[in-house]
Amino acid sequence: MNNFGNSLRNIREAKGITIKQAAKNIVTPAFLSKFERGESEISFSRLLKILDHMNVDINEFILETNDFEEHPQRKFLKKLIDAANNKSITIFDNLEKNEALLYTKDDNLRHKHNILLCHLYKSEITNTPPEKDDWMPIKNYLMGVEDWAYYEFLLYANSLYFLPTEIIELVSKSAYQKGMRYLSLNDNKNGLIDTLLNTIETLLTRNETKLVIVYIKLCENLIQSPDLMFERVRLIFYKGALQYLTGDSELGISKMNEAIQIMQLTNFNGNDIKNFEDFKNIISK
């Protein structure tokens, strides 16, 4: 609560809002002052009302509380991708040891999932099939969660590639049903869209063209917003890939090239363009 109170004061003062203005009709100014000093606690519902009155989103508040540091899971995943890019078993082993140590300290299931992700990514480097014991606990967890949120979408995005096709079908459909419940939350909507696009990409690499169509249709209904340009370009690219794989090679190549050109014209990340080009080369061999 000390952190919360201090963060609220920092935001309030940065906005030029007095304690009296922030507390209006929610709590007394004296109570709010004690909360900011860490001398009293406040209910979550009242805290949300105060933040709303100050026009502060809860995610902004959490970011301030964490000193604008990235979530630990994001940090772990960056190290995981770095290990994969460098094909370093040593980095994977160190990550795994650290996650095991963290699990003994706080008993957070996230660390167990991270250990399994290390195993899955190492299997790609060693050219061995993913072990069922490594992906099954992740699959069981995802299927058991009633409402997917940020963590579930992130976990699935980083394990989907290693799952058997029939499991991807099962989990992706479940993700769509559960993710739609909180579609008004931007993180959930973006997570669901990425899940559908990642599902499409993985199925295309496995030449499962008949299975892809339903996910393309689901995705089309979710990416109409103008702020989802990259996602719309991805979908154009995958539609081209599907046309190529189903026999219309000329139109398929043209549509994939169109998506790459849009990326180049709009100055998207160079790695994104390279990923498109690499994917096109893989399926057009």
Image (cartoon, rainbow, N blue to C red):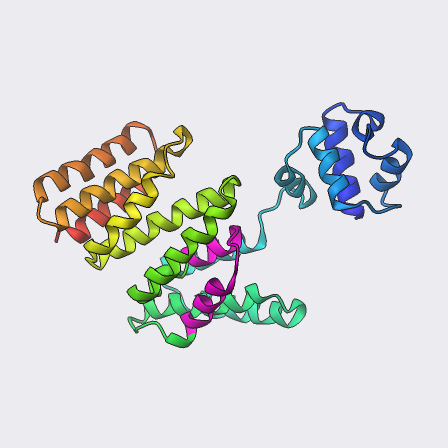
Residue 136 within the segment the image draws in magenta: yes
Q: Residue at x 81, y 33 (%)?
A: 26
Residue 269 appears anywhere in the view: no
- As rendered, which of 219 and 100 lies closer to the eye? 219
Q: Residue at x 14, y 50 (%)?
A: 245
Residue 176 in picture, x, y percent from top left = 41, 51
Residue 239 within the segment the image draws in magenta: no
Q: Please, is residue 171 above or below residue 276 in the view?
A: below
Residue 35 in picture, x, y percent from top left = 84, 41
Q: Is residue 86 left or right of residue 103?
A: left
Q: Residue at x 63, y 35 (%)?
A: 57
Residue 266 appears anywhere in the view: yes
| SS assignment for the magenta stretch, majority | helix
Q: Is residue 280 left or right of residue 23?
A: left
- As rendered, which of 43 and 102 lies closer to the eye? 43
Magenta segment: 134-157
Q: Is residue 272 left or right of residue 28?
A: left
Q: Please, is residue 241 above or below residue 125 in the view?
A: above
Q: How many discs appear?
A: 0
